[in-house]
Image (spheres, rainbow, N blue to C red):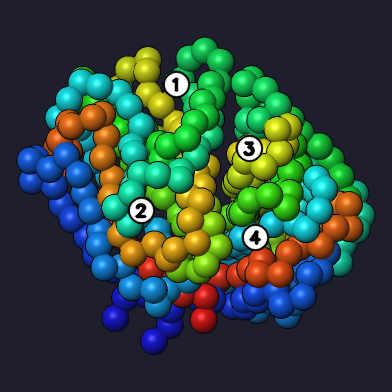
Amino acid sequence: MATATYTPIATTTLGTAVNNFTFSSIPSTYTDLRLVVNGNVAAAINNINARFNSDSGSNYSFTNVGIRALSTTPFSGRDSQTYLGLCWYTAWTSAQQSMIIADFLNYANTNVYKTSISQNITQEGDGTYSGIENTVGTWRSTAAINSIYLYTNNTNNFSVGTTFTLYGIKAA
Amino acid sequence: MANTYELISSTVATGSQATITFSSIPSTYTDILLRVSARMSSTTLDTYNLAFNGSTANFSYRNLYGAGTGALGSSTGSSGATGINEPSTYTANTFGSMDLYIPNYATSQYKSASSIAVSENNSTEAYAVFTGNVWSSTSAITSISITSAGTANFAQYSSFYLYGIKNS
């Protein structure tokens, strides 16, 4: 029998619009986590951020590279914040489906800070902030990730039908 | 049995195919992943081009690419362009790679897709390309076709694997 790879931990399809979503009680039995978010936000221009284990301290930093509708020149930037920016220079809007795929590596290893690599695809619908964005990030904590809090920066709601899925990936 | 990537179908090119098609894709998964290892029989460097359910209509794309030298570039358009191919002028016996991930492919929403692709070349030119696509259709994806560089054939031993991923 083949060794299991992606194992679904939790999934939700929104039946009510909300401006945040939390995966809690994440088991520590996997090696890596993969987060897949697919949907849109009901109004305005919104960044999508993440926090781990309810940590709202200045313990996050990230570097991104991408392209957005505003310019034909690719962007690259970095930030240190109280959150991990999964969609930072681009933004989710109400017009089209957008998606985030984020990998959190060695999320349960209590000897290391936690790293992530993610892609955000924001489809056409806004002439400035639509685009693609790839981000690497660090959460400066050796704690195992046991919760992931996702939210929009403008408190606008993720639309009904938006899906949040978390997979566990085992190395062996 | 634990959930994993489940292989839906696979094709290894014989050298005489310009189009690779996965048809009758079941709607029983949540997301799908197309994993490509391919080389072209032609010298033309180009993107791959997608068709869903037999149609190239209602697509858009935006990509970001680097070639190892010079500034990053980007392009956008109304097509199913995605990834980057491996032309026959690149290092012999070498195949480029692409992962194309499509979440919620069987829902009644418009479909997003994300690809990461590289061309492999022991030279000063080799590409890494990130692409976002949208297919503005509420139909479930039941077939995927991939072509490149017009009517050029995929080289023998190019492989295409379609996986289904379940969220429960």
Which of discs 3 and 2 lies nearer the camera? The answer is: 2
Residue B49 position in % (x across, y down): 34, 39
Residue drawn at (67%, 42%), measured in percent from left and top? A125
Q: Secondary structure at mark 2?
A: strand
Spatial CA span between label 4 and label 3? 15 Å
Residue toward you, A106 or B129: B129
Task: Tell me which amino acid carries mark 4.
Answer: Gly
- Chain bearing mark 2: B
Left/right placement of residue B43 relative to residue B36 reads left
Left/right placement of residue B25 relative to residue B89 reads right
Spatial CA span between label 3 and label 2? 22 Å
Quadrant of the rendered image containing residue B82 = top left
- What residue is disc 4 on? A39
Task: Tell me which amino acid carries mark 1.
Answer: Ala
Which of discs 4 and 1 lies nearer the camera? The answer is: 4
Q: Of the numbered discs in the image, which one, if any, rests on residue A123?
A: none
Q: Residue furthest bottom?
A: B1
Do the residues marked 4 and 1 share a common chain? Answer: no
Do the residues marked 3 and 1 share a common chain? Answer: no
Q: Of the numbered discs in the image, which one, if any, rests on residue B67?
A: 1
Left/right placement of residue A4 relative to residue A111 reads left
- What residue is disc 3 on? A131
Quadrant of the rendered image containing residue B6 = bottom left
Q: Of the numbered discs in the image, which one, if any, rests on residue B52?
A: 2
Spatial CA span between label 4 and label 1? 32 Å
